[in-house]
Amino acid sequence: IPYVDGWVLPAAPVESFRAGTHNHVPVIIGTNADEVSLMVPDGSVTPAEVTTFFERFPEPLRSQLPVLYPPGTTPEEARTAYIQALGDGQFTCQARLISRALVEGQTEPVRRYFFTHTVPGPLGVSLGAFHGIENFYLFRTAESTLMAMLLGPDDRTVMDALGGWWTRLASTGDPNCGSGPTWPAYDAATDPYLEIAVTPVVGAGLHTEACDLWEPITEIPTE
């Protein structure tokens, strides 16, 4: 959580965004489908542990979290629930909060993404679209790491698409190029986003029910 010291950081970033006192620029903001999977190894949590974790939250989260993220009956199901819950609470729903704040405080467009592409094989099955994976594609560093041996044509398609969107944003303020789906500017009422995959798709209302529940929560228990 940023420390508001009254000097370097005179106000909480979200409040600065809403007030329009930040530097106004076109923005791309987004998250990945399995943000915390790297921190939750296979077999590391049980349904009972996930249930206990949910019980630490105040109402209405205590009652609603098991409904939104059923702990299941196996470690695999529990891990999925835990990853999805933490991913929404710490990343995806925070991105919605920040996107809404930005469009409230500036006229420059904001665009939101949700990265769902995974590397082929067992690594992709286990980790999904983990935290930071999009950077391997955006900066093409996947080609110079151990991931290189896993990459196929679909991965290079995603690399090319990401590079094009970010480069056009930097040069013109608009990532669109006239081909493929049109990435819409963010609107708080409809919550539009671009799902980044081999075939990108424009969507609206990303995890709305979950984010309506998480939004009042500013900090997640860590112990």
Image: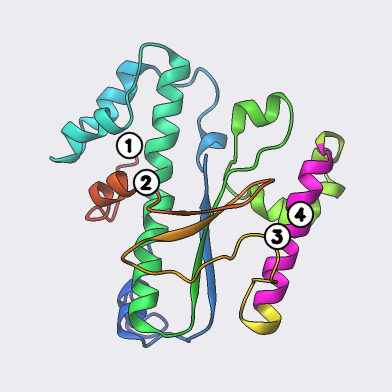
Circle 4 sits on which residue? 159
Q: Which three-letter amino acid code belongs to the residue tagged 3?
A: Leu
Label 2 or label 3, whichever comes before in sequence order: 3
Please state which amino acid type lies under the numbered disc 2.
Answer: His
Quarter of the rendering containing residue 146: top right
Residue in view at x 33 percent, y 78 percent: 104
Asked whether disc 3 touches disc 1, contact meaning CB atoms under 8 Å apart, the reply is: no
> Residue under circle 1?
223
In three-dimensional space, the C-alpha distance between marks 1 and 4, rounded to whole angstroms, equals 37 Å
The reply to whether discs 1 and 2 touch (Cβ–Cβ < 8 Å) is no
Marker disc for residue 207: 2
What percent of the width, then of the height, locates residue 35? 51, 43
Classed neighbour count for the residue bearing mark 1: other residues with Cα under 10 Å, few (<14), some (14–19), many (≥20): few
Task: Write down the quadrant of residue 4 in the picture.
Answer: bottom left
Type of the residue with mark 4: Met
> Is 201 in front, or is 53?
201
Observer able to see residue 5: no
Q: Quadrant of the N terminus?
A: bottom left
Indicate the quadrant containing the C terminus: top left, top right, bottom left or bottom right: top left
User: Alpha-carbon neighbours of circle 2 within 10 Å: few (<14), some, or many (≥20)?
Assistant: few
Outermost residue, top side: 73
User: At which x and y percent is residue 134?
Assistant: 65, 52
Q: Position of residue 211 (x, y in %)?
A: 31, 50
Q: CA distance from mark 2 to mark 3?
A: 23 Å
Q: Secondary structure at mark 4?
A: helix
Of circles 3 and 1, the one toward us is 3
> What range of the chain is rendered magenta?
151-169
Is 202 on the left or on the right of 54, as rendered?
right
